[in-house]
Amino acid sequence: MEIPYTVTARKDTGLFNSKVGIWLFLASEVMLFGGLFSGYVFLRIYADYPWPERALPIVPGLINTFVLIGSSVTVVFAWAALKMREWRRFQIFMGITIACAGMFMVLKGIEYKAKWEHQAVRMDDFAIIEGHAHYGAVMENGEVDHFHTKLEAKKAGGGKPFKTNKILFRPATIDFSVVRAHEPWIAEMLEQAGKRKSKLVTSGDVFFYGHIEDYSGTESDPLTGKDRAKQEAKIVKEFGKAEENLARKFGKNSLYIPAGTPLDYGLIKKARKAYIAGRAHNAETRTAILKENWRRVKEILPEKEYWEQAPVAKIDAATQLDEQFDDQGNCVSGSKVVSLVSTLSFRMDPPQPLVIKRSWIKRPVKAKDGKAELRDDTTLSAGDDQDQGAGLLASPVALSVDAIDFRWMAQKAEEAGKEPMEVIEQSWIFSKDNKHHGDYEQIWKVHKKRIGELEQELADKYGKDAEGKPKRVPTETDRYRVTWQDLVHYARAKKDSLMPGDAGFDELRPKFWDGFAGPNHKDEEIHKLHAFPELEVPHHKVSMQSMFTPKWNTYYAIYFTLTGLHGLHVIGGAIVLGYFLFFSKGLYRRNPEWLANRVEIGGLFWHFVDLVWIFLFPILYLM
Amino acid sequence: MSAEASAEHGHDHDDHHHDLPFYKKYIWSTDHKVIGIQYGITALLFLAFGFFLMMVMRWSIAYPEEPLPGYLSWIFSDEWKARWLQDGRVTGDTYNMFGAMHGTIMVFLGIVPLGFAAFGNFVTPLQIGTVDMAFPRLNMVSYWLYLVGGLTMCASFFMESGAAKSGWTNYSPLANFADGQIVNQFLAGQTQWLLGMVFLISSSLLGAVNFLTTLINLRAKGMTWMRMPFFCWAMLVTGFLLLLAFPPLEVAAIMQLMDRTVGSSFFMPSGLYTSGAGVIEASGGGSPLLYQHLFWFLGHPEVYVLLLPAIACVAEIIPVNTRKPLWGYKPMVWSIVILGFLSFIVWAHHMYLTGMGPVISTWFQTTTVLISVPSVILLTSMIVSLWGGSIRFNVPMLWAVAFLPMFGIGGLTGLPLAFNLVDLHLHDTYYVIGHFHYVVAPGILFGLFAGIYHWYPKITGRHMDTFLGHLHFWPSLVFMNVLFFPMLVQGMAGFHRRWYNGGDAYLSKAAGSENIFGNTVAEWIHLNPIMTFGAFMLALAQIPFFINFWLSIFVGKKIKNDNPYDATTLEWATPTPPPHGNFTFDVAAYRGPYEYSREDHEGDFYPQWEEPKRDKPAKEPKPEPAQ
Amino acid sequence: MADTLEEIQKAQKKYILIGLILFVFTVVTVAVATVPWLDFGEHGFDSKDAVIGLIIASFKASLVGAIFMHLNHEKKLIYVVLVLGVIMGIVLVVLTGWSFEDPIEYGDSVEGDGFYNPAETVNQD
């Protein structure tokens, strides 16, 4: 059996199969990227925050555009070489194409890495600070110090260095949900506690009932069984003994944890097993009782409506579940359901700071709550020892600032009918509460002056319109955003004692190709100039913090999604083309035309990938 | 010819494939027929599973205060019951989970694979007279992607989070929060749903590319566009719908996946607050409405992806069993093409309540009403096709004929929903459920059952049993209506589609009650147990089918020859079951697909593949050279 | 399509030329966005810059499509498929945009904030 038209074209359509296939596929790709582009357009047009326009460094994107266009030319040459049956030439051009794909991905990787290392903070007054987070280390005495680099933090001793976007909490007790406690987090907490010479031990005795076989209420009628009552009474009595005899087993999944047992995940797992067995037993018992109730109700009240029967059929816990006593106060029937222990409580002795990732947290941690809830239902609480320093520690986001953005604050001020400049100058960053406020006042003064000069320059150059308004004015971004280029610019000017408007001031500005993939904090000049000032944003001022990842805003979200999917297409295309290059010599000998067809198809896909990038480059880098 | 004999027969023409090992022949198969059967059986199993979920839900609606009966709950483990049921009763969470998965499974894992992938795979290459699909290996990949996607989704039932629980539409931001407490988001049901969806969409895209290429490039000699059976036309249009409508949903799924796993805010508006987590620590700035647009851009064409294969099956069965040509073949072809196109510009009629303005609402209302024109042409043509025919009421024909009025009810009940003013009242009520299920269950599913009974002899070489067929058909017909008709009534009375206890919580007959639902609920809540009874009877009615389906392979009546129905289309020209490579002669189409009862031809059918007799060549159209 | 060998030979020069044009227009699109005296419209980025950027990108894309992907001389069927894809893409963007741009608005005939308030109705009686 052979499928027709794999190599030669069908007469009436003029096409071979895979060419029809690839164009159909490309049509669906048009829809895929069309959907993503429409996402970009609508997210941008209807954004309720200042969209970060022209936010990416252009140079890597520009080089990548050249690389992809170049590879598009070489792939079509590779195809032409095959058509002319020049294997060597085909190899060369295809090799270049794949090398281009590799280079594209390397550049993409450099760009991505720069973003993943870039910290941003949105303060509660909508001021936005960008920069590189400092590192913190918890010393053995429980003090926390901040350092510029990981290396410095390491040298200073103490625990593992952490980025200052974490939260520090000194818990007196930690409650773990037996069902949901997450093993890696427990391991992390234990490791940190160990480093700081602290222990996590259970705060009280805990007894888990296991699954009690005799109870499984399905075998005999739970409402009437007299034997059951006797058995239950016996079991209740035995429970008393069990408490005395700590080691004694009670039901196959029963568990006794005495106070002072150190935390480990195995313990939680055992407790989980007991809990789940107990829960299953309770559910089974209650289901059986409810079923029986309904059977009775339908016998007794057959004429009533369903919703009138329902209240009668409800389980009455007092008579149907709880312990029953006779007139003399003797227990005749034990509780039919076991009580479930769903959390295990541990004491931290002595309380030491724990570094907690923000991604662990279920809801924002506030100092006054005295607790931190994690997503696996673990609760760290300060307990009653709050005055001894337990609870949330000062967890500022400390960073070297490379951009300050007041655009959102200005937007909010305008929405509230206030003067943006006034609001900005009253912001926390310029207030006395900020111990570095002097630096920022200085920068802001220079910035305002420079924008004033720019405004004047534009007015002089482009004149005014009929209403007397200047034709061109500085943008919101110019006015309210201090970029890293601005910071370096101002620092250089400060060194030369120049102010905006002075001769030679403008020449000090970094060019657009400086700082390949963004501000370079390791640059010697920048380091010497202290161009990127320090800042510690207190925990309660942080309304949102993130790296420059999809989380930070919808712009980075769509940027990563679009370029990520495009990157996957590049990788996929390169793999297919690589297959043609490295594993198709045999096919070339047998049926060179077939290989040429395949390369044509691969090439079509490759051109499409190039075509998508031609749109991605301007909309993400230049707009 | 018996199955065994024809298998021998197949070997004669298939010299280098007969020694394929079992796993290559039936599991990692690239043969379009085996893949079609794989799709069919998998889809039937998913349909049964989806049906089971529905029975649990119906129990909860009718008897919200009672524990699930043993025959529904035996399948769950004790631990599962303790986690998801409360004293054996279905909880709201569990109901949501089952509801979301019922919808997803039925639509994406049941009907589409059965209609488009199973029948499409088996029948299309046969009907256009070719050896296989254009890309057989891609075809195999499609199936396995589908299976992986389906299992990924269903596996989440056993996870800590349970399966997806935000409705089959998975609207944001609800779907963004669901299962948010799970530490590893990739192990959350809601995320698994998205991952499964990405697999399913990829599978559908590959399938669509394959079908379209096959239909465009692999038609046999003389098989011109207007000689293609209507079934193939339906597959062509369906293929285009899948090809162009699915990518936006893939976009939506990827974006929601980003929202869930890396914390982006594509579909999260600013300043969102939930009782569970307070102010959400997300950037905000996203658009929940964007999700709905991307979803329904697929969602509406998807309805036609469900429908067209069923209509196509019926359109094949009617001419065969009335012994007369399909009435209005050309208008039907044009209708289906126009229908396909229009289905792309109606989607926001699902979104009248999202605050769209009157202008755009009018646009969508107009296009929605317009789309009923081609639908009515299709249905009318098929009804007229019955007129004056000498109808053989065999089992497939019963299903096919029942399809017409049932789908008619489904279609007509949709008209009120098209008008945005009426929709304000009916939106999210049981009326919508009733309408949609009339289209899909007694409509589409009847069409697909018809197809199963019709092509079964070609697949196995044996007929399905007629008595069991009747035992399947008549109760199904009755109980489908018992199940779905009361929904229309309840819906108009204002029963909300997401009441897990069927309105029980809203019951109130107190005069002047604040509860505006109370009185209508009390009036119509009696319908709940009736519908539930219908559903359970419907389940019983499917038992004969499953028995029939499996047993007839071995004990069914053998077919008299390769063309047991005296049909005219090319799939009946092959040996039975068709061997790898399908045809044993150089196949060509000499005439249109429905040449029944031609006066100038002896016998009441004139197959497409029969070479015209030499003495009257002038009357036959010359086969167009295709090669 | 370069069907014969001679045509392929000839086409190669064309491919190089197109490649160069694409390079040049890439530089142009960056220049338009970065060089102040090439800035159209207002100072800084605005809608005119977006339109110009997209026009240049579309021009480049159509060169890639027409020459590298041979769309300047393709079979009819491929145009049909591609046009369908593009139409549906446009439909998606346009209709979605339309419904974003056409929210419910209350005319002057409705007083107050436009929302029905039963309490007010009662007071009017």
Image (cartoon, coloured by chain):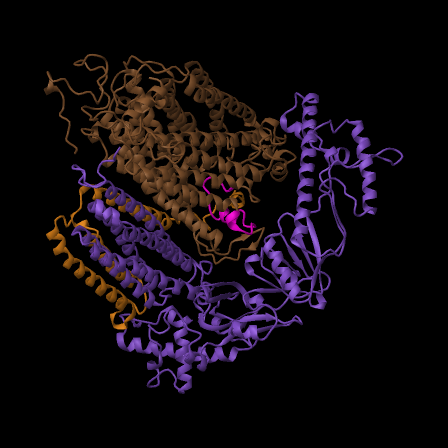
Chain shown in purple: A
Residues in magenta, as a range: B163-187
B245 with respect to A342 (left or right): left
B539 with respect to A142 (left or right): left
What residue appears at the point 26 percent right and 60 percent down from the top-left corner? A96
Residue B42 vs residue B576, the one in the foreground: B576
Q: Quadrant of the C terminus of chain A?
A: bottom left
- Can you give x and y, in whole percent of width and height, for residue C74 in the image? 17, 46
What residue appears at the point 43 percent right and 61 percent down from the top-left corner? A49
Chain shown in orange: C
What residue appears at the point 27 percent right and 42 percent down from the top-left corner? A21
- Can you give x and y, in whole percent of width and height, for residue B432 in the image? 45, 33
Residue B424 vs residue A285, the one in the foreground: A285
Q: Is residue B181 magenta?
A: yes
- Image hue for chain B: brown
A139, above or below B558, in the image: below
A615, above or below A491, in the image: above
B401, above or below A54, in the image: above
Residue B168 vs residue B371, the one in the foreground: B168
